[in-house]
DNA sequence: CGGAACATTGAGGATACTCAACTACGGTGG
DNA sequence: CCACCGTAGTTGAGTATCCTCAATGTTCCG
Protein backbone atom coordinates (compact mmCIF):
# COMPACT_ATOMS: atom_id res chain seq x y z
CA UNK A 1 0.00 0.00 0.00
CA UNK A 2 2.67 2.50 0.96
CA UNK A 3 4.83 3.08 -2.06
CA UNK A 4 7.39 5.29 -0.38
CA UNK A 5 9.81 3.95 2.18
CA UNK A 6 10.38 5.63 5.48
CA UNK A 7 14.06 6.46 5.77
CA UNK A 8 15.70 3.74 7.79
CA UNK A 9 12.74 1.42 7.33
CA UNK A 10 14.01 -2.04 6.59
CA UNK A 11 11.59 -4.82 5.67
CA UNK A 12 14.22 -7.40 6.57
CA UNK A 13 14.23 -6.25 10.18
CA UNK A 14 10.46 -6.29 10.15
CA UNK A 15 10.51 -9.87 8.93
CA UNK A 16 13.07 -11.10 11.43
CA UNK A 17 11.13 -9.45 14.24
CA UNK A 18 8.13 -11.54 13.29
CA UNK A 19 10.21 -14.63 14.04
CA UNK A 20 11.91 -13.65 17.30
CA UNK A 21 12.66 -10.56 19.37
CA UNK A 22 15.91 -8.98 18.26
CA UNK A 23 18.38 -7.93 20.91
CA UNK A 24 19.61 -4.34 20.74
CA UNK A 25 22.95 -5.59 19.43
CA UNK A 26 21.30 -7.59 16.70
CA UNK A 27 19.08 -4.71 15.66
CA UNK A 28 22.03 -2.34 15.61
CA UNK A 29 24.01 -4.73 13.45
CA UNK A 30 21.13 -5.10 11.01
CA UNK A 31 20.45 -1.37 10.87
CA UNK A 32 24.07 -0.65 10.11
CA UNK A 33 24.48 -3.48 7.65
CA UNK A 34 26.43 -1.86 4.81
CA UNK A 35 24.07 -1.77 1.89
CA UNK A 36 24.16 -0.18 -1.51
CA UNK A 37 20.63 0.99 -2.19
CA UNK A 38 19.45 1.32 -5.78
CA UNK A 39 16.22 1.94 -7.63
CA UNK A 40 15.56 -0.45 -10.50
CA UNK A 41 12.81 -0.06 -13.00
CA UNK A 42 10.42 -2.82 -13.96
CA UNK A 43 11.35 -5.74 -16.17
CA UNK A 44 15.07 -5.52 -15.51
CA UNK A 45 17.22 -8.55 -14.85
CA UNK A 46 19.19 -8.12 -11.64
CA UNK A 47 21.18 -11.34 -11.90
CA UNK A 48 21.24 -14.11 -14.46
CA UNK A 49 21.58 -17.89 -14.46
CA UNK A 50 25.28 -18.71 -14.42
CA UNK A 51 26.37 -15.57 -12.60
CA UNK A 52 28.89 -15.80 -9.78
CA UNK A 53 27.94 -13.32 -7.12
CA UNK A 54 29.88 -11.63 -4.37
CA UNK A 55 26.84 -9.89 -2.95
CA UNK A 56 23.17 -10.60 -2.36
CA UNK A 57 20.15 -8.49 -3.08
CA UNK A 58 17.57 -7.47 -0.49
CA UNK A 59 14.25 -6.25 -1.87
CA UNK A 60 13.23 -3.09 -0.03
CA UNK A 61 10.09 -2.41 -2.03
CA UNK A 62 8.45 -3.53 -5.23
CA UNK A 63 7.75 -6.84 -6.88
CA UNK A 64 10.19 -9.23 -8.50
CA UNK A 65 10.50 -12.86 -9.54
CA UNK A 66 13.06 -15.57 -9.98
CA UNK A 67 12.86 -17.63 -13.14
CA UNK A 68 14.56 -20.21 -15.29
CA UNK A 69 14.51 -20.68 -19.04
CA UNK A 70 14.33 -23.90 -21.06
CA UNK A 71 16.63 -24.49 -24.00
CA UNK A 72 13.66 -23.67 -26.22
CA UNK A 73 13.32 -20.29 -24.58
CA UNK A 74 10.25 -20.99 -22.49
CA UNK A 75 10.27 -19.16 -19.18
CA UNK A 76 9.25 -20.67 -15.87
CA UNK A 77 8.88 -18.31 -12.95
CA UNK A 78 9.86 -20.27 -9.86
CA UNK A 79 8.98 -17.68 -7.23
CA UNK A 80 7.55 -14.26 -6.65
CA UNK A 81 9.66 -11.98 -4.54
CA UNK A 82 8.39 -9.20 -2.28
CA UNK A 83 9.77 -6.69 0.20
CA UNK A 84 12.00 -8.27 2.83
CA UNK A 85 13.04 -11.18 0.61
CA UNK A 86 16.62 -11.93 -0.38
CA UNK A 87 16.07 -14.01 -3.51
CA UNK A 88 19.74 -14.83 -4.08
CA UNK A 89 20.76 -15.49 -0.49
CA UNK A 90 21.69 -18.98 -1.67
CA UNK A 91 24.66 -17.49 -3.50
CA UNK A 92 26.31 -17.18 -0.10
CA UNK A 93 26.99 -20.92 -0.26
CA UNK A 94 26.53 -21.87 -3.91
CA UNK A 95 29.14 -20.58 -6.29
CA UNK A 96 27.06 -20.24 -9.40
CA UNK A 97 23.45 -19.13 -9.73
CA UNK A 98 21.02 -21.60 -11.21
CA UNK A 99 18.26 -19.08 -11.83
CA UNK A 100 17.76 -15.56 -13.02
CA UNK A 101 16.02 -12.87 -11.10
CA UNK A 102 14.28 -9.78 -12.45
CA UNK A 103 11.94 -7.03 -11.36
CA UNK A 104 8.23 -7.09 -12.16
CA UNK A 105 7.45 -3.60 -10.89
CA UNK A 106 9.85 -0.74 -10.14
CA UNK A 107 11.88 -1.85 -7.14
CA UNK A 108 14.11 -0.43 -4.50
CA UNK A 109 16.82 -2.92 -3.65
CA UNK A 110 19.82 -3.08 -1.34
CA UNK A 111 22.99 -4.95 -2.26
CA UNK A 112 24.88 -6.47 0.64
CA UNK A 113 28.27 -8.07 0.13
CA UNK A 114 28.73 -11.69 1.05
CA UNK A 115 31.56 -10.64 3.32
CA UNK A 116 29.22 -8.41 5.28
CA UNK A 117 26.64 -11.20 5.47
CA UNK A 118 29.22 -13.71 6.62
CA UNK A 119 30.43 -11.33 9.32
CA UNK A 120 26.85 -10.87 10.45
CA UNK A 121 26.34 -14.63 10.58
CA UNK A 122 29.47 -15.34 12.61
CA UNK A 123 28.81 -12.55 15.11
CA UNK A 124 25.10 -13.22 15.46
CA UNK A 125 24.27 -16.93 15.29
CA UNK A 126 20.57 -16.30 15.69
CA UNK A 127 20.61 -14.16 12.58
CA UNK A 128 22.54 -16.90 10.77
CA UNK A 129 19.85 -19.36 11.80
CA UNK A 130 17.16 -16.99 10.65
CA UNK A 131 18.82 -16.68 7.25
CA UNK A 132 19.13 -20.41 6.93
CA UNK A 133 15.49 -20.66 7.95
CA UNK A 134 14.49 -18.19 5.25
CA UNK A 135 16.16 -20.29 2.57
CA UNK A 136 14.40 -23.36 3.98
CA UNK A 137 11.06 -21.61 3.68
CA UNK A 138 11.88 -20.75 0.08
CA UNK A 139 12.50 -24.45 -0.47
CA UNK A 140 9.16 -25.28 1.15
CA UNK A 141 7.46 -22.89 -1.26
CA UNK A 142 9.20 -24.55 -4.21
CA UNK A 143 7.92 -27.90 -3.01
CA UNK A 144 4.41 -26.56 -2.86
CA UNK A 145 4.78 -25.14 -6.36
CA UNK A 146 5.92 -28.51 -7.70
CA UNK A 147 2.72 -29.98 -6.33
CA UNK A 148 0.62 -27.07 -7.55
CA UNK A 149 1.92 -27.35 -11.10
CA UNK A 150 2.09 -31.13 -11.10
CA UNK A 151 -1.19 -32.09 -9.52
CA UNK A 152 -3.77 -29.32 -9.80
CA UNK A 153 -5.67 -28.15 -12.87
CA UNK A 154 -5.48 -24.57 -14.02
CA UNK A 155 -8.48 -23.32 -12.05
CA UNK A 156 -7.37 -24.69 -8.69
CA UNK A 157 -3.76 -23.89 -9.44
CA UNK A 158 -4.55 -20.23 -9.96
CA UNK A 159 -6.71 -20.10 -6.84
CA UNK A 160 -3.84 -21.57 -4.87
CA UNK A 161 -1.25 -19.11 -6.03
CA UNK A 162 -3.54 -16.17 -5.38
CA UNK A 163 -4.02 -17.40 -1.83
CA UNK A 164 -0.31 -17.74 -1.35
CA UNK A 165 0.34 -14.26 -2.66
CA UNK A 166 -2.35 -12.72 -0.48
CA UNK A 167 -1.01 -14.37 2.66
CA UNK A 168 2.57 -13.41 1.92
CA UNK A 169 1.57 -9.84 1.12
CA UNK A 170 -0.37 -9.70 4.35
CA UNK A 171 2.58 -11.03 6.34
CA UNK A 172 4.73 -8.32 4.75
CA UNK A 173 2.19 -5.66 5.69
CA UNK A 174 1.28 -5.06 2.07
CA UNK A 175 -2.35 -6.15 2.18
CA UNK A 176 -5.30 -4.92 4.16
CA UNK A 177 -8.28 -7.18 4.60
CA UNK A 178 -8.14 -9.30 1.52
CA UNK A 179 -7.13 -6.54 -0.82
CA UNK A 180 -3.69 -5.93 -2.22
CA UNK A 181 -1.89 -4.39 -5.11
CA UNK A 182 -0.49 -7.12 -7.36
CA UNK A 183 1.42 -5.79 -10.35
CA UNK A 184 1.58 -9.25 -11.92
CA UNK A 185 0.43 -9.55 -15.53
CA UNK A 186 -1.35 -12.55 -16.98
CA UNK A 187 1.80 -13.36 -18.91
CA UNK A 188 3.67 -13.66 -15.63
CA UNK A 189 0.97 -15.77 -14.04
CA UNK A 190 1.17 -18.02 -17.07
CA UNK A 191 4.93 -18.39 -16.67
CA UNK A 192 4.55 -19.10 -12.99
CA UNK A 193 1.80 -21.68 -13.39
CA UNK A 194 3.09 -23.49 -16.44
CA UNK A 195 0.15 -22.33 -18.58
CA UNK A 196 -0.38 -20.12 -21.61
CA UNK A 197 -1.57 -16.54 -21.36
CA UNK A 198 -4.74 -17.40 -23.20
CA UNK A 199 -5.63 -20.05 -20.69
CA UNK A 200 -4.76 -17.87 -17.73
CA UNK A 201 -7.13 -15.29 -19.11
CA UNK A 202 -9.95 -17.81 -19.31
CA UNK A 203 -9.30 -19.06 -15.81
CA UNK A 204 -9.35 -15.49 -14.50
CA UNK A 205 -12.73 -14.96 -16.10
CA UNK A 206 -14.01 -18.12 -14.51
CA UNK A 207 -12.74 -17.08 -11.08
CA UNK A 208 -14.31 -13.65 -11.51
CA UNK A 209 -17.53 -15.22 -12.72
CA UNK A 210 -17.62 -17.47 -9.68
CA UNK A 211 -17.21 -14.45 -7.42
CA UNK A 212 -13.89 -15.65 -6.06
CA UNK A 213 -11.82 -12.66 -7.10
CA UNK A 214 -12.35 -9.06 -8.14
CA UNK A 215 -9.73 -7.20 -10.12
CA UNK A 216 -9.51 -3.48 -10.78
CA UNK A 217 -6.31 -2.77 -12.61
CA UNK A 218 -3.53 -4.22 -10.51
CA UNK A 219 -5.70 -4.32 -7.41
CA UNK A 220 -6.81 -7.76 -6.32
CA UNK A 221 -9.73 -8.26 -3.95
CA UNK A 222 -10.76 -11.62 -2.57
CA UNK A 223 -14.41 -11.22 -1.53
CA UNK A 224 -14.80 -14.67 -0.03
CA UNK A 225 -11.50 -15.81 1.41
CA UNK A 226 -12.72 -19.11 2.76
CA UNK A 227 -14.19 -20.08 -0.56
CA UNK A 228 -11.03 -19.27 -2.51
CA UNK A 229 -8.94 -21.05 0.06
CA UNK A 230 -11.09 -24.10 -0.34
CA UNK A 231 -10.93 -24.01 -4.12
CA UNK A 232 -7.17 -23.61 -4.01
CA UNK A 233 -6.81 -26.28 -1.30
CA UNK A 234 -4.70 -23.68 0.42
CA UNK A 235 -3.14 -24.43 3.78
CA UNK A 236 -0.58 -21.74 4.71
CA UNK A 237 1.39 -24.22 6.82
CA UNK A 238 4.13 -24.53 4.22
CA UNK A 239 4.86 -20.80 4.50
CA UNK A 240 6.00 -21.44 8.08
CA UNK A 241 4.75 -18.09 9.34
CA UNK A 242 5.11 -17.61 13.05
CA UNK A 243 1.88 -15.76 13.60
CA UNK A 244 -1.12 -17.35 12.01
CA UNK A 245 -2.36 -13.96 10.89
CA UNK A 246 -2.06 -16.00 7.75
CA UNK A 247 -5.15 -18.09 8.04
CA UNK A 248 -7.26 -14.96 8.50
CA UNK B 1 25.75 -51.33 -6.76
CA UNK B 2 26.91 -52.51 -3.37
CA UNK B 3 23.86 -53.40 -1.37
CA UNK B 4 25.64 -54.14 1.89
CA UNK B 5 27.26 -51.40 3.90
CA UNK B 6 30.79 -51.71 5.15
CA UNK B 7 30.75 -51.29 8.91
CA UNK B 8 31.60 -47.68 9.64
CA UNK B 9 30.94 -46.64 6.06
CA UNK B 10 28.99 -43.44 6.08
CA UNK B 11 27.70 -41.93 2.82
CA UNK B 12 27.37 -38.55 4.51
CA UNK B 13 31.12 -38.40 5.11
CA UNK B 14 31.68 -39.47 1.54
CA UNK B 15 29.47 -36.65 0.33
CA UNK B 16 31.06 -33.99 2.50
CA UNK B 17 34.49 -35.09 1.36
CA UNK B 18 33.47 -34.40 -2.21
CA UNK B 19 32.93 -30.77 -1.20
CA UNK B 20 36.02 -30.11 0.91
CA UNK B 21 38.76 -31.98 2.74
CA UNK B 22 37.67 -32.83 6.24
CA UNK B 23 40.08 -32.20 9.08
CA UNK B 24 40.77 -35.10 11.41
CA UNK B 25 38.64 -33.43 14.06
CA UNK B 26 35.74 -33.01 11.70
CA UNK B 27 35.95 -36.60 10.49
CA UNK B 28 36.14 -37.88 14.05
CA UNK B 29 33.09 -35.86 15.00
CA UNK B 30 31.14 -37.18 12.02
CA UNK B 31 32.20 -40.76 12.59
CA UNK B 32 31.13 -40.59 16.20
CA UNK B 33 27.92 -38.75 15.52
CA UNK B 34 25.40 -40.55 17.73
CA UNK B 35 23.05 -42.27 15.36
CA UNK B 36 20.30 -44.79 15.76
CA UNK B 37 20.57 -47.10 12.78
CA UNK B 38 17.49 -48.93 11.56
CA UNK B 39 16.43 -51.03 8.61
CA UNK B 40 13.14 -50.01 7.04
CA UNK B 41 11.32 -51.98 4.43
CA UNK B 42 9.98 -50.54 1.23
CA UNK B 43 6.89 -48.38 1.02
CA UNK B 44 6.99 -47.27 4.65
CA UNK B 45 6.38 -43.70 5.72
CA UNK B 46 9.23 -42.46 7.89
CA UNK B 47 7.73 -39.08 8.71
CA UNK B 48 4.48 -37.37 7.72
CA UNK B 49 3.33 -33.90 6.79
CA UNK B 50 2.51 -32.06 9.99
CA UNK B 51 4.98 -33.96 12.17
CA UNK B 52 7.17 -32.09 14.65
CA UNK B 53 10.55 -33.73 14.73
CA UNK B 54 13.34 -33.78 17.26
CA UNK B 55 15.68 -35.78 15.03
CA UNK B 56 16.59 -36.00 11.38
CA UNK B 57 17.02 -39.03 9.18
CA UNK B 58 20.16 -39.84 7.22
CA UNK B 59 19.77 -42.36 4.41
CA UNK B 60 22.59 -44.90 4.60
CA UNK B 61 21.39 -47.06 1.74
CA UNK B 62 18.30 -47.60 -0.36
CA UNK B 63 15.92 -45.38 -2.21
CA UNK B 64 13.29 -43.05 -0.79
CA UNK B 65 11.19 -40.03 -1.75
CA UNK B 66 9.58 -36.99 -0.23
CA UNK B 67 6.02 -36.23 -1.28
CA UNK B 68 2.98 -34.12 -0.64
CA UNK B 69 -0.68 -34.93 -1.05
CA UNK B 70 -3.50 -32.76 -2.39
CA UNK B 71 -6.81 -32.52 -0.58
CA UNK B 72 -8.21 -34.87 -3.22
CA UNK B 73 -5.61 -37.44 -2.34
CA UNK B 74 -3.35 -37.04 -5.35
CA UNK B 75 0.30 -37.61 -4.54
CA UNK B 76 3.14 -35.47 -5.82
CA UNK B 77 6.64 -36.75 -5.25
CA UNK B 78 8.83 -33.68 -4.80
CA UNK B 79 12.20 -35.39 -4.62
CA UNK B 80 13.97 -38.69 -4.81
CA UNK B 81 16.30 -39.43 -1.95
CA UNK B 82 19.45 -41.57 -2.11
CA UNK B 83 22.29 -42.60 0.15
CA UNK B 84 23.95 -39.65 1.89
CA UNK B 85 20.85 -37.46 1.79
CA UNK B 86 19.11 -36.07 4.87
CA UNK B 87 15.65 -35.38 3.49
CA UNK B 88 14.29 -33.76 6.63
CA UNK B 89 17.31 -31.70 7.59
CA UNK B 90 15.03 -28.68 7.26
CA UNK B 91 13.27 -29.76 10.46
CA UNK B 92 16.31 -28.45 12.31
CA UNK B 93 14.96 -24.93 11.73
CA UNK B 94 11.32 -25.41 10.76
CA UNK B 95 9.02 -26.58 13.51
CA UNK B 96 6.52 -28.50 11.47
CA UNK B 97 7.12 -30.67 8.43
CA UNK B 98 5.37 -29.64 5.23
CA UNK B 99 5.97 -32.93 3.42
CA UNK B 100 5.96 -36.63 4.01
CA UNK B 101 8.83 -38.93 3.39
CA UNK B 102 8.75 -42.65 2.67
CA UNK B 103 10.96 -45.45 1.41
CA UNK B 104 10.79 -46.75 -2.14
CA UNK B 105 13.13 -49.70 -1.65
CA UNK B 106 14.29 -51.30 1.59
CA UNK B 107 16.47 -48.73 3.32
CA UNK B 108 19.01 -48.49 6.03
CA UNK B 109 18.66 -45.18 7.83
CA UNK B 110 20.30 -43.40 10.74
CA UNK B 111 18.38 -41.10 13.05
CA UNK B 112 20.37 -38.22 14.51
CA UNK B 113 18.88 -35.96 17.16
CA UNK B 114 18.60 -32.28 16.45
CA UNK B 115 20.60 -31.65 19.60
CA UNK B 116 23.48 -33.69 18.23
CA UNK B 117 23.25 -31.90 14.89
CA UNK B 118 23.19 -28.51 16.58
CA UNK B 119 26.24 -29.41 18.64
CA UNK B 120 28.02 -30.50 15.50
CA UNK B 121 27.12 -27.22 13.79
CA UNK B 122 28.31 -25.01 16.62
CA UNK B 123 31.60 -26.90 17.05
CA UNK B 124 32.33 -27.27 13.35
CA UNK B 125 31.20 -24.22 11.36
CA UNK B 126 32.35 -25.75 8.10
CA UNK B 127 30.04 -28.67 8.64
CA UNK B 128 27.24 -26.24 9.47
CA UNK B 129 27.91 -24.45 6.18
CA UNK B 130 27.96 -27.75 4.35
CA UNK B 131 24.57 -28.67 5.83
CA UNK B 132 23.14 -25.32 4.88
CA UNK B 133 24.61 -25.84 1.43
CA UNK B 134 22.94 -29.24 1.14
CA UNK B 135 19.54 -27.73 1.86
CA UNK B 136 20.25 -25.03 -0.72
CA UNK B 137 21.01 -27.68 -3.31
CA UNK B 138 17.74 -29.38 -2.47
CA UNK B 139 16.04 -26.06 -3.13
CA UNK B 140 17.85 -25.77 -6.46
CA UNK B 141 16.55 -29.20 -7.42
CA UNK B 142 13.01 -28.18 -6.49
CA UNK B 143 13.35 -25.14 -8.72
CA UNK B 144 14.46 -27.34 -11.58
CA UNK B 145 11.50 -29.63 -10.97
CA UNK B 146 9.09 -26.72 -11.08
CA UNK B 147 10.45 -25.88 -14.50
CA UNK B 148 10.48 -29.51 -15.59
CA UNK B 149 6.85 -30.05 -14.66
CA UNK B 150 5.72 -26.60 -15.75
CA UNK B 151 7.42 -26.17 -19.07
CA UNK B 152 8.39 -29.50 -20.59
CA UNK B 153 6.14 -32.10 -22.18
CA UNK B 154 6.07 -35.66 -20.89
CA UNK B 155 8.76 -36.99 -23.22
CA UNK B 156 11.37 -34.35 -22.42
CA UNK B 157 10.33 -34.27 -18.79
CA UNK B 158 11.04 -37.96 -18.38
CA UNK B 159 14.36 -37.66 -20.20
CA UNK B 160 15.32 -34.85 -17.86
CA UNK B 161 14.54 -36.69 -14.66
CA UNK B 162 16.38 -39.79 -15.84
CA UNK B 163 19.46 -37.66 -16.50
CA UNK B 164 19.21 -36.11 -13.06
CA UNK B 165 18.90 -39.49 -11.39
CA UNK B 166 21.83 -40.94 -13.30
CA UNK B 167 24.08 -38.03 -12.40
CA UNK B 168 23.10 -38.09 -8.75
CA UNK B 169 23.56 -41.85 -8.58
CA UNK B 170 26.95 -41.49 -10.15
CA UNK B 171 27.96 -38.78 -7.69
CA UNK B 172 26.91 -41.09 -4.88
CA UNK B 173 28.99 -43.91 -6.34
CA UNK B 174 25.89 -45.92 -7.23
CA UNK B 175 26.27 -45.96 -10.99
CA UNK B 176 28.98 -47.27 -13.27
CA UNK B 177 29.20 -45.96 -16.78
CA UNK B 178 25.64 -45.02 -17.53
CA UNK B 179 24.08 -47.96 -15.82
CA UNK B 180 22.40 -47.99 -12.45
CA UNK B 181 19.85 -49.79 -10.40
CA UNK B 182 16.71 -47.68 -10.11
CA UNK B 183 13.97 -49.29 -8.03
CA UNK B 184 11.43 -46.67 -9.11
CA UNK B 185 8.14 -47.92 -10.50
CA UNK B 186 6.18 -46.22 -13.25
CA UNK B 187 3.61 -45.21 -10.64
CA UNK B 188 6.31 -43.32 -8.79
CA UNK B 189 7.63 -41.69 -11.94
CA UNK B 190 4.07 -40.61 -12.67
CA UNK B 191 3.75 -39.05 -9.22
CA UNK B 192 7.07 -37.30 -9.60
CA UNK B 193 6.38 -35.91 -13.05
CA UNK B 194 2.76 -34.92 -12.62
CA UNK B 195 1.55 -37.52 -15.12
CA UNK B 196 -0.55 -40.67 -15.06
CA UNK B 197 0.93 -44.14 -14.99
CA UNK B 198 -0.57 -44.90 -18.38
CA UNK B 199 1.16 -41.95 -19.94
CA UNK B 200 4.45 -42.68 -18.24
CA UNK B 201 4.29 -46.15 -19.72
CA UNK B 202 3.79 -44.76 -23.21
CA UNK B 203 6.62 -42.30 -22.81
CA UNK B 204 8.92 -45.08 -21.63
CA UNK B 205 8.10 -47.07 -24.73
CA UNK B 206 8.85 -44.09 -26.88
CA UNK B 207 12.20 -43.52 -25.16
CA UNK B 208 13.06 -47.19 -25.55
CA UNK B 209 11.96 -47.12 -29.17
CA UNK B 210 14.18 -44.11 -29.80
CA UNK B 211 17.13 -45.98 -28.31
CA UNK B 212 17.53 -43.47 -25.48
CA UNK B 213 17.11 -45.90 -22.62
CA UNK B 214 17.28 -49.64 -22.00
CA UNK B 215 15.55 -51.19 -19.01
CA UNK B 216 15.99 -54.68 -17.63
CA UNK B 217 13.96 -55.01 -14.48
CA UNK B 218 15.07 -52.20 -12.21
CA UNK B 219 18.32 -51.74 -14.11
CA UNK B 220 18.49 -48.60 -16.23
CA UNK B 221 21.04 -48.22 -19.00
CA UNK B 222 21.52 -45.05 -21.00
CA UNK B 223 23.19 -46.13 -24.25
CA UNK B 224 23.66 -42.65 -25.67
CA UNK B 225 24.15 -40.20 -22.85
CA UNK B 226 24.64 -37.13 -25.01
CA UNK B 227 21.46 -37.78 -26.89
CA UNK B 228 19.36 -38.25 -23.76
CA UNK B 229 20.93 -35.18 -22.22
CA UNK B 230 19.99 -33.20 -25.27
CA UNK B 231 16.42 -34.49 -25.30
CA UNK B 232 16.06 -33.72 -21.60
CA UNK B 233 17.77 -30.33 -21.99
CA UNK B 234 19.82 -31.47 -19.06
CA UNK B 235 22.53 -29.24 -17.64
CA UNK B 236 23.80 -30.60 -14.29
CA UNK B 237 24.74 -27.13 -13.12
CA UNK B 238 21.76 -26.89 -10.78
CA UNK B 239 23.00 -29.93 -8.86
CA UNK B 240 26.00 -27.86 -7.78
CA UNK B 241 28.38 -30.81 -7.78
CA UNK B 242 31.96 -29.93 -7.08
CA UNK B 243 33.54 -32.33 -9.49
CA UNK B 244 32.06 -32.27 -12.95
CA UNK B 245 32.23 -36.06 -13.08
CA UNK B 246 28.62 -35.18 -13.63
CA UNK B 247 28.76 -34.10 -17.23
CA UNK B 248 30.47 -37.35 -18.16
C1' DC C 1 -0.46 -72.27 -7.88
C1' DG C 2 -2.66 -68.04 -6.70
C1' DG C 3 -2.46 -63.40 -5.62
C1' DA C 4 -0.62 -58.82 -5.68
C1' DA C 5 1.88 -55.34 -7.68
C1' DC C 6 3.49 -53.64 -11.83
C1' DA C 7 3.30 -53.01 -16.77
C1' DT C 8 0.82 -52.64 -21.08
C1' DT C 9 -2.90 -51.77 -24.45
C1' DG C 10 -7.11 -49.55 -26.64
C1' DA C 11 -10.80 -46.28 -27.13
C1' DG C 12 -12.88 -42.15 -26.09
C1' DG C 13 -12.72 -37.62 -23.90
C1' DA C 14 -11.17 -33.30 -21.49
C1' DT C 15 -7.98 -29.92 -20.41
C1' DA C 16 -5.04 -26.87 -22.14
C1' DC C 17 -2.49 -25.31 -26.44
C1' DT C 18 -1.83 -22.90 -31.03
C1' DC C 19 -2.85 -19.51 -34.09
C1' DA C 20 -4.83 -15.45 -35.18
C1' DA C 21 -7.47 -11.53 -34.71
C1' DC C 22 -9.25 -7.82 -32.14
C1' DT C 23 -10.03 -4.52 -28.10
C1' DA C 24 -8.51 -1.50 -24.35
C1' DC C 25 -5.35 1.39 -22.30
C1' DG C 26 -1.47 4.38 -21.34
C1' DG C 27 2.30 6.85 -22.91
C1' DT C 28 4.82 9.39 -26.44
C1' DG C 29 5.77 12.38 -30.11
C1' DG C 30 4.42 15.32 -33.90
C1' DC D 1 -4.43 17.61 -28.83
C1' DC D 2 -4.66 13.71 -31.30
C1' DA D 3 -2.47 10.02 -33.88
C1' DC D 4 0.32 6.34 -33.09
C1' DC D 5 2.52 2.64 -30.87
C1' DG D 6 3.40 -1.00 -27.55
C1' DT D 7 1.75 -3.70 -23.96
C1' DA D 8 -1.84 -6.16 -21.81
C1' DG D 9 -6.07 -8.34 -22.09
C1' DT D 10 -9.83 -10.85 -24.62
C1' DT D 11 -12.15 -13.89 -27.95
C1' DG D 12 -12.93 -17.84 -31.30
C1' DA D 13 -11.91 -22.02 -33.80
C1' DG D 14 -9.38 -25.99 -34.35
C1' DT D 15 -6.00 -29.22 -32.32
C1' DA D 16 -2.82 -31.94 -29.38
C1' DT D 17 -1.29 -33.68 -25.33
C1' DC D 18 -2.50 -36.07 -21.77
C1' DC D 19 -6.31 -38.17 -18.98
C1' DT D 20 -9.97 -41.66 -17.78
C1' DC D 21 -11.69 -46.04 -17.73
C1' DA D 22 -11.25 -50.63 -18.26
C1' DA D 23 -9.20 -54.73 -19.58
C1' DT D 24 -5.29 -57.74 -20.18
C1' DG D 25 -0.49 -59.34 -19.76
C1' DT D 26 3.60 -60.09 -16.84
C1' DT D 27 6.52 -60.83 -13.00
C1' DC D 28 7.50 -61.94 -8.53
C1' DC D 29 6.73 -64.09 -4.19
C1' DG D 30 4.68 -66.81 -0.56
Image (cartoon, coloured by chain):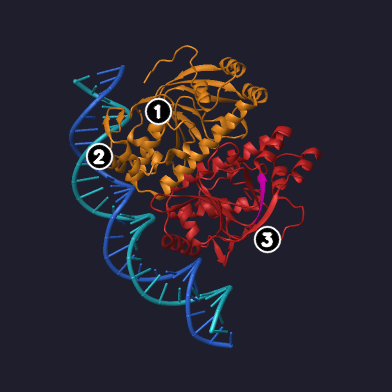
Chain colours: A red, B orange, C cyan, D blue
Labels 2 and 1 touching (C-beta < 8 A): no
Residue B88: image location, x then y, percent:
54, 30
Q: Nearer the viewer, residue B160 or A216?
A: B160
Question: What residue is shown at x 47% (from left), y 64% (from top)?
Answer: A205
10 Å crowding of disc 3: few (<14), some (14-19), many (20+) = few
Q: CA distance from mark 3 to mark 2?
A: 54 Å
Q: Which residue is mark 1?
A: B170
Which picture quadrant has residue A180?
Answer: bottom right
Residue B219: image location, x then y, percent:
30, 27
Q: Nearer the viewer, residue B73 or B4?
A: B4
Question: What residue is shown at x 27% (from left), y 42% (from top)?
Answer: B202
Same chain for mark 2 and mark 1? The answer is yes
Chain of the residue on which disc 3 is drawn: A
Q: Is residue B6 magenta?
A: no
Outermost residue on the right side: it is A24
Disc on res. A1? 3
Rendered view: B172 above or below A116: above
Same chain for mark 1 and mark 3? The answer is no
10 Å crowding of disc 1: few (<14), some (14-19), many (20+) = some
Give the left or right position of residue C26, taking residue B221 as reference. right
Under circle 3, the secondary element is loop
Residue bounds of the magenta highlight: A108-112
Q: Which residue is mark 2?
A: B205
- Look at the image and tell me in which quarter the C terminus of chain B lies: top left
Mark 1, mark 3: which one is toward the viewer? 1
Q: Is residue B47 visible?
A: yes
How many numbered tags mark residues here? 3
Q: CA distance from mark 2 to mark 1?
A: 24 Å
Q: Is residue B158 visible?
A: no
Question: What residue is shown at x 49% (from left), y 57% (from top)?
Answer: A189
Earlier in the chain: of badge 2 and badge 1, it is 1
Amino acid sequence: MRSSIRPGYNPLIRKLESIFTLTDDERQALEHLPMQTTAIKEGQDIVREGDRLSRSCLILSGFACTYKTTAQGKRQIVSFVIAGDIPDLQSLHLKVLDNSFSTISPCSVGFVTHDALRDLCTCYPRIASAFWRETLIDAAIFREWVMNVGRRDAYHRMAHILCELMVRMKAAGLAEGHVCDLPITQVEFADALGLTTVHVNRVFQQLRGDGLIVTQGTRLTIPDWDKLREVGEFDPMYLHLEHAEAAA
